[in-house]
Image (cartoon, grey):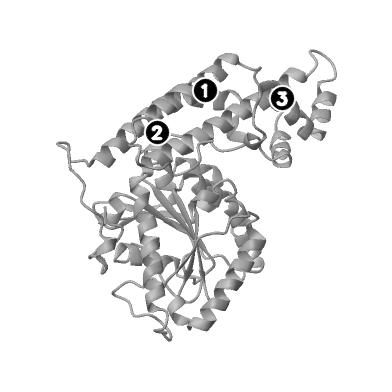
Amino acid sequence: MDIKGKGKAKDPSLTPAGSNIGSDGLTAEEQLYQETVHRLQKSYSKKIKPLEQAYCFEGFHSAPLTAQDIGSKPMILLLGQYSTGKTTFVEYLLGESYPGAHVGIEPTTDRFVAIMNGPEPKVIPGHAAAVSGDLPFSGLTKFGTKFLSRFQVAQLNNPLLSNLTLIDTPGILSGSKQIQRGYDFTSVINWFAERSDLVLLLFDGYKLDISDEFKGAIQSLRGHEDKVRIVLNKCDQINQQQLMRVYGALMWSLGKVIPTPEVNRVYLGSFWPKYKTPVGTVYEDNIDLLTSEQRDLLRDLRSIPKNAALRRVNEIVKRARQARVHAHIIGHLRSELPSMFGKNKKAKAMLDDLPAEFRKIQVKYNLPPGDFPNPEAFKQDLEAFKIADFNKFSQRLIANADEALASDFPRLMQKFPTGNNPAGNFG
């Protein structure tokens, strides 16, 4: 599978080796992906989804997954401040422009655009895309009319899009304009991040500042750090000495926003489609470095379809663990209420000391602390409900989820070649 849309890569190392095609016209990887998706859909709908629905998992995390959510093509989410080259980067990958694309030095992409494969170039408005049974975007309806008016699907017949879906996002501004969108931008980003296989944060050497909204968007990626890659774009417009300083400044800025001890992988490059002439002065002293960096990034992107099946298993396992812990929390809080009088008083006392309740649940059910949600965020969500209205703890539903985690998913993992590495951490 070639990561570039049209034309061949200049470097032979960027062209992947051919895959054996079966009698059904699918490669071995595609056959494995389809089988994995089918089994995941079956296990999730029978053993995980009932647990989510019983304890209103949707009110604290996200809506139950549909068959389209689980079976959708691998997705790449692009994030960045305005004019950092997100749309041009998409055109570089595709080898052509996509329907509705507009590029300029001013903020141009003012909507979320899902670029997908289709028989002919066309644009599907957000409201129609959200109700289409063939597209994995039904969950976006919860963000309301204002968001759906700023969302669209762009379809075109491109080889790259037979394996991937690209999500182009609005350029993020600084100042008061960023908070006047009419919808919760960071929640939308989190929704796409949960379903994405890779998240690319794009910067350029002249826009290293991180606005409040961009900071919030980056922090909403917490829990998906393994998917995040940093791209420093337009590096051919900076000489070698300046590039060293820009790289250091970028790492310093990111260190204040992403509080992890690990150093983020930063790819350097200048991503211009062949049919466009680079804007501004181009320095030649970084050509070899940028060529090598762009090759590494393309190799990373090309591995996404190959590891898509593993990623799907990983995401469902992660979600199942979250749903299981959520059920234990709700079941415990419900069981602690008195049978008749004083329910509201007891509920308030538990909410005021939620970390202590979490510790009780961890000890009682031998659950790892790392699987528990943030107490403050959980408390805010829980205040919208009455604890007494939740279902009582169901050992049967928990047992079904345990069976999926202990048996169904490990059995599915045995079908993968031992030489492959999981796309994420299953622990």
User: Quick check: 53 above or below 375?
Assistant: above
- At which x and y percent is residue 38? 34, 30
Q: Are marks 3 and 2 in contact (CB under 8 Å)?
A: no
**Crowd around label 2: few <14 · some 14–19 · many ≥20 (10 Å):** some
Which quadrant of the structure image shows residue 138? top left
Secondary structure of residue under mark 3: helix
- At which x and y percent is residue 373? 66, 37
Given this view, does label 2 or label 1 mark the residue nearer the observer?
A: 1
Secondary structure of residue under mark 1: helix
Residue at (35%, 33%) from the top-left corner?
Answer: 36
- At which x and y percent is residue 120? 24, 55
Q: What's the residue type where badge 1 is placed?
A: Ala
Q: What's the residue type where badge 2 is placed?
A: Ala
Which callout, 3 or 2, points at the residue further toward the start of the chain? 2
Which quadrant of the structure image shows residue 332? top right
The residue lying furthest to the front in this view is: 419
- At which x and y percent is residue 293? 41, 67
Using the rendered image of the protein, determine whether residue 308 is visible from the camera's viewpoint: yes
Which quadrant of the structure image shows residue 252? bottom right
User: Quick check: 83 above or below 113?
Assistant: below
Residue 67: numbered disc: 2
**Separation of disc 3 and disc 2 at Cα?**
35 Å
- The residue identified by callout 1 is 401
**Crowd around label 3: few <14 · some 14–19 · many ≥20 (10 Å):** few
Residue 363: numbered disc: 3
Which callout, 2 or 1, points at the residue further toward the start of the chain? 2
Q: What's the residue type where badge 3 is placed?
A: Val
Residue at (38%, 47%) from the top-left corner?
Answer: 74
Which callout, 3 or 1, points at the residue further toward the start of the chain? 3
Q: Are marks 2 and 1 in contact (CB under 8 Å)?
A: no
Viewer-closest of 28 and 107: 28
